[in-house]
Image: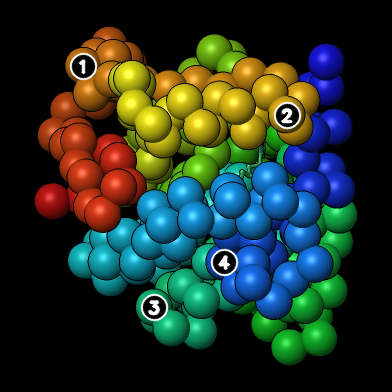
Amino acid sequence: MKDQKDYWENRILDWEGVSYGDAETQPVSLVERVAHYFRGPVRHRPAVAFELIRRAKPARVLELGCGSGRLAFDLVTRAGVAHVTGVDISESAIAFAGERARALGMAGQLNFVASSISNLNFDAYRPYDFVLGMGLTPYLTGMEFERLFDAMRGVSFLFDVHPKGISFQNFSHAVYRMLKGHPFYNTFSKEEILGRLTQAGFSNVTWNVSQGVFYVTNVG
Ligand SMILES: C[S@@+](CC[C@H](N)C(=O)[O-])C[C@H]1O[C@@H](n2cnc3c(N)ncnc32)[C@H](O)[C@@H]1O
């Protein structure tokens, strides 16, 4: 069985292409072509992040699981964020993001770090006033959740979760993961994730749903 790094290392750029691009015009497998049509919520996630970031107005964002930095670039160019540190377990995605930042003369505003959450030295990237993780929580170990929660203390945060439950969406996603050899995938009920956050000492956290995106935040 692959671990998360093996799984994502060379897959994330294609995954982004299929998820955000047009599956009709890309040379992708039938499985990915079908998966594209279930990724409406994935395509809606940036809009959710934008809305919350515009409300919270952070100067410096720490984005975990940033992939090739699509959202990080947009936050700087279109949402008025002064600086984003993007972190991802995939070295190839981070190399791609870093090269793009340099090519666009944005290396002062965008810093990309190849690391798992378990190995990240969070203190090296402070101060930040917003922690963002879209499409990340299904892939975190228990220890990585603890580290994520520690990183969120005293700042604004937003992360989405894949909801538990019996649904066609969850069934088809489980088949997709099996076909792809995916190592593990966390789903949560509202009670579970809010319970964990309460236990970790967070108050004023809300569970929200927007066009199939389930997310928790402390931004009011
Ligand atoms: C579903 S993709 C989401 C990418 C991007 N945030 C988006 O919404 O388009 C999940 C991302 O999390 C990264 N990832 C998975 N496990 C990770 C871990 N333990 N530490 C850091 N990044 C991780 C993967 O490499 C991948 O880029």
Please report the residue visible at 84 percent of the width from the left and 74 percent of the height from the top: 99
Residue 129: percent from left, percent from top: 39, 54
Instruction: State the image quarter where residue 217 is shown.
Output: top left
Q: Which residue is mark 2?
A: 179
Question: Which three-letter amino acid code belongs to the residue tagged 3?
Answer: Ala
User: Quick one: 170 or 85, which is closer to the camera?
Assistant: 170
Residue 86 shows up from this direction: no
Q: Mark 3 or mark 1, which is nearer the start of the sequence? A: 3
Q: Amino acid at mark 2?
A: Leu
Question: Which marked residue is nearer to the observer: mark 1 or mark 4?
Answer: 4
Q: Residue at x 38, y 41 (%)?
A: 160
Give the left or right position of residue 45, taking residue 32 as reference: left
Q: Secondary structure at mark 1?
A: helix
User: Along the line of sight, which residue is nearer the eye, 164 or 129?
Assistant: 164
Residue indicated by mark 1:
191
Q: CA distance from mark 1 to mark 3?
A: 32 Å
* Residue 137 seen in the current view: yes
Residue at label 4?
20
Q: Nearer the viewer, mark 3 or mark 4?
A: 4
Q: Which residue is mark 3?
A: 79
The vertical placement of 65 against 206, above or below, is below
User: Is the residue at mark 4 in contact range of ligand 1, meaning its CB lies under 8 Å from it?
Assistant: yes
Mark nearer the N terminus (2 vs 4): 4
Residue at 68% x, 65% y: name it.
17
How is the structure coloured here?
A: rainbow
